[in-house]
Amino acid sequence: MTEELRRLGRLLLAPSVALLFVWMIVPLAMTIYFSTLHYDLLNPGAGGFVGLENYEYFLTDPAFLASLRNTLVLVGSVLAITIIVGTLVALLLDQAVVGRSIVRLMVIAPFFVMPTVSALVWKNLLMHPVSGLFAFIATSLGLVPIDWFTDLPLLAIILIVSWQWLPFAALILLTALQSLDEEQKEAAEMDGAPALSRFFYITLPHLARPITVVILIETIFLLTVFAEIFVTTGGGPGLATTNIAFLIYSQALIQFDVGTASAGGLVAVVIANIVAFFLVRIVGRNLDA
Amino acid sequence: MGSITLEGVRKSFGPHAVIHGADLAIEDGSFVVFVGPSGCGKTTLLRLIAGLEDVSGGRVLIDGANVVGVPPAKRGLSMVFQSYALYPHMSVRGNIGFGLKMAGLERAEINRKVEAAAATLNLTPYLDRKPRELSGGQRQRVAIGRAIVREPKAFLFDEPLSNLDAALRVQMRLEVTKLQRQLATTAVYVTHDQVEAMTMADRIVVLNAGKIEQYGSPLELYERPANLFVAGFIGSPRMNFIAGEGAQRYGAATIGVRPEHLRASRDGEGWEGRVSVAEHLGSDTFLHVEVTGIGTLTARSVGELGLTMGDSVRLLPDPARIYRFAGDGKAMRQ
Amino acid sequence: MARQVSPTRTWATTVAAWIVGLLIFFPILWMVLASFKTELEAFSVPPSFLFFHWTTENYAAVQGRSDYVHHAVNSVIIAGGSTLIALLIAIPAAWSMAFAPTRRTRDILLWMLSTKMMPPVGVLVPIYLLYRNFGLLDSRAGLVLVLCLGNLPIVIWMLFTYFKEIPKDILEAARMDGATVGRELIYVLTPMAVPGIASTLLLNVILAWNEAFWTLNLSTSEAAPLTVFIASYSSPEGLFWARLSAASTLAIAPILVLGWFSQRQLVRGLTFGAVK
């Protein structure tokens, strides 16, 4: 390490740091600025400084509370489904399976499908109350087909998003499982532990850390689910499938209420930062290791 | 020309001083070995000469010119790394010729020089192979080839033989020494193995905790060590040290006798003791003896003595070979 | 290492795994099947599984539409362009952090990752307005810019991890051989890092291709990539399920193939090293 190298290092790092800094700060600063204004996109001239009024409006708006509830339900459900099912899938794939690589390909595939494609395939080909596959299965069993997007819209979205993120959880957990020392499990077996105990006392604790990571990363990305809602329900019926991201979008680009949308945007950033804080801590600890 | 001079060279990593004021004059064409225990700073000193680390103070002169601040690429030196550091994506030819390519030589010229270097090192049949297809010894030679082909002012070796197995190491020791004599280029060689140092060097630099303890020819270091540390470091098995009363009788704080200068006999003159371990090598015998009132001494005898554990024995030191050391560790005049 | 598993057990786990795999993969399979049906058959009740009139008329119709090709080209330009530009910016940055680290390097790296964790919707308003004022709405350049900046942290992070695996003394050897840092990057580092660079490129092209927030909000027709194009099928009049399936299959096929190759990179890139 010489001074020359160090100087060069700083020089070569500068563009990235500068770019990301601008990318972070400028829009964020503007968002803060706008959130203190009454700004109508259609009528940019009118309106002016209103201080924290927008925040008050946004946070007391029943739409906000509904969207917050929806966001939490959405994120929580998807986390639960992807992690539980993901763990089971990972456990299964960790076994001896003929043609394992093909099965892996099938399990991984949903993550790589465009969100807009996923959403439309589920909505039209599977969940359509008349000509969808689920409807067919229901009627064959003598049940009334569910009109997903009318009666259970949030659940429909949850299913779609879970399907997309299941491969991520499964892949991460499978990777973690495969790093579990075989000898630990064998030692437990020799100590007389039955399979279920081995799972709870050895496998599960080993998975604790990767599960935490999956939770944190998925949360960060799930907070801003957008495309699936945009393409299927447009937030409805009513506010049933509006999450915070969609609420802000609709205020900005449908109602053209820039001020309120900015206030909402900042709220979303704050929530995300809380989660990010914990994730960065774990990543940082790993970097030192 | 390839003389290297260090004047008051210091190096600290943050608050830790690793080299404390090194002064050294390496003559052109000589083979100088830096030797010392782990962490003594020998590799750091080498890297300071190479330019891979900046000095914290002092001057480094190559042929009289101060190269502090000059990047390694411009110092005209070559280095052979402990791990060889070959370019894995290039062939042997590419590896050896890379420095010449950086210097902007013509392709034909590069080929000529590369082939000459390869011939010297018996690498010609491997010129088009990649490093991963070569054995450890072959990779070692490619690393050396890469260094010699640029005809540098000096070679720098960073423990180049420590990754080889014992037999190969002995063979390569001879080859490197021969090569350096043949090329008559200055060589600075770092090792922790004092046998390598003694057999290869014109002069040895013994380092300890960032300080140069002594700089001299192998024989000088063996016969006239400057202090306790050098006396104990050079020579295998280690010199025996006796402190306390045994030393005061000679007017010193510590005295030292080398195992090869202790004559062992069943009954005769000398210190009396009991053999605790006897190592029979056939050609030599090493006796580890508990001497009453003094401690454990190691004695070396040529041939077989027929002594085993438990036997009593007498050790007579050669009076001309007793070294005396003062309280501060420095050698006292004989 | 592993004991011999009994054939019954293998058989059981294989069947179970295949059932699970097929269930998960099923929607995609169903979509591909639908793409080969006629429109009528696509939403007939009861739906036919394998025994229907196979036709490629949908693919012909989709490819015949010049706007499909137009949007596909947009996807390629936007995904490829944003990733390549990000690579160019990221390689020197990753080199710096891997080989010339300072006391602040770790914090800078973590900060960069945290910018990726910012919800895009939080800055939707200013970006939209800025783009509107600078005429960047519905422009490929605009999308390339946003996606490049959005993925830059991941590109830098992944390259950093790959560069760390390169032994430092090979680069030092290059320096002793007379190479300047630029030539060290070109002749030694990049060739050695090619697999890592390729993996990074792969994963990020996939992420950019599938990006469906900025693309949906910042483009409408001219610069719209396939994500937007497919979304336009969501309006109720467009009851062209078979054609939708064909268009979707074409849109996702290349990415599915690339995704298969980038599984390990996925773990490395998206868990930020928190899982080994």
Image: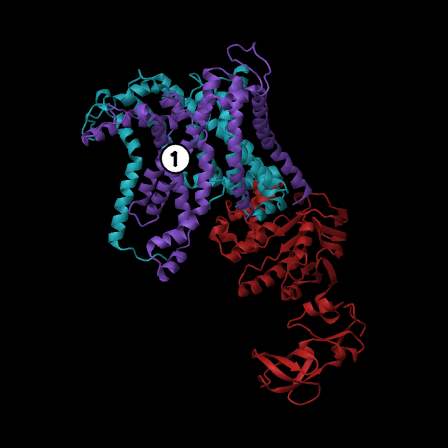
Chain colours: A purple, B red, C cyan
- Residue C46 in the figure: left or right of residue B270: left
Task: Specify the subunit that label 1 lies on.
Answer: A
Q: Position of residue B300 (x, y in %)?
A: 64, 79
Can residue C145 be seen in the rendering of this structure? no
Q: Image quarter for residue B20?
A: bottom right
Instruction: Look at 41% across and 35% down and name the residue there.
Output: A76
Q: Position of residue B308 (x, y in %)?
A: 57, 84
Instruction: Look at 30% across and 48% down and name the residue there.
Output: A97
- In the displayed image of the protein, which residue is found farthest to the bottom? B267
Element type at marker 1?
helix
Q: Image quarter for residue B23?
A: bottom right
- Residue A23 in the figure: left or right of residue C50: right
Q: Position of residue B215 (x, y in %)?
A: 74, 62
Instruction: Look at 25% across and 21% down and name the residue there.
Output: C57
Residue labelled with disc 1: A77
- Residue B251 in the figure: left or right of residue B295: right
Q: Nearer the viewer, residue B192 or B243?
A: B243
Q: Position of residue B29 (x, y in %)?
A: 70, 56
Which quarter shows the N terminus of chain A?
top right
* Amino acid residing under circle 1: Ser
